[in-house]
Image: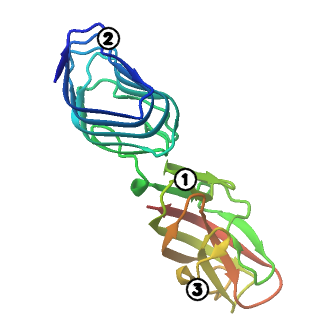
Amino acid sequence: MVIANSASVGSISNFDLAFFSIVQYLNNTTGITYSNINQLLLNSEGWSQTNSGTYQTFTGTFDVIAKQGGFSEVVGATAAIDVTGISSISGGGTIRNVDFFGGGNYINGTATYTNYNFNTDWDVDCAGIPVEKDAAAAGNFYYDGAVTTGFTQSITNGTAVEVEGNGTFTSNNLFRFNSSGGNNRLTYEGTKDRQFQINATLSVRVTGAAGNFYAFFIAKNGSVLTESRSVVYIDNDTQIQNVALNENTILNNNDFIEVYVQRLTGSGTDSLIIFSENLSIN
């Protein structure tokens, strides 16, 4: 089917199921609007640069939107896709194997994350725009203070506690994660449970603890993951040690990750000095 030379392709709304397949759009002034459709299926559609306006606009409520195959060539048009008017999409949206090209504005979206287009309701994997799906979720944080002095934390007992002290942290490259608790806690915001690889490194010194042992851990939801532990022996007050942690674990929506420390032997008050700390999840 070819739809060409129209002032407006039109609108379709209030259907239980709408299915468009193998359609080419040419030289249309305004595209099509889809509203309040339970199941919307779009397959192998071609939008050439001869079209203008917004090619496909989605508004209202949907159960499922699935767009598969085809292309959108955008040069002077307003956008290929506009999803800013969607109020809910209960079953999620997918856009797969659609080629976006031409150099114009491809998506008017409701991006939750910097440099992305969609919120967590969507699973997007197409040429020309960022991949957005739970399988691509990732994030990191790092200590951003002076490396020569580091930050300090008092250790007064043998309870495992978060490594935080008076340090300041920066988080960036977040996708389907957010940072909180001073930016050194990463919380998974994806909708699907999945396995993550977590890596962390620290450079540490402990004063007042010569002859004692310390352990560092990855912690999930405030509980240490024992298999991630790295144990160090404190020889003297000037010793700086590098600690590497890694963990492979399943995260559910709203699970969060931190770095913990525990004094294994000794008593009194020790000073833990962190010169560098960074953690990444992917």
- Tell me how far mark 2 sits from mark 1, CA to CA: 38 Å
Q: Nearer the viewer, residue 119 or 42?
A: 42
Q: What element carries label 3?
A: strand
Kindly identify which numbered label has been placed on residue 8.
2
Give the x, y percent position of residue 272.
70, 74
Q: Name the residue under label 1.
A: 189
Q: In which quarter of the image is the C terminus?
A: bottom left
Q: Quadrant of the N terminus?
A: top left
99 left or right of 18?
left
- Tell me how far mark 3 sits from mark 2, CA to CA: 67 Å
Q: Earlier in the sequence, mark 3 or mark 2?
A: 2
Give the x, y percent position of residue 107.
38, 29
Q: What element carries label 1?
A: loop
Q: In which quarter of the image is residue 75?
A: top left
222 left or right of 36?
right
Vertical placement of residue 76 versus 270, above or below? above
Q: Nearer the viewer, residue 65 or 163?
A: 65
Vertical placement of residue 253 versus 226, above or below? above
Q: Residue furthest left?
A: 1
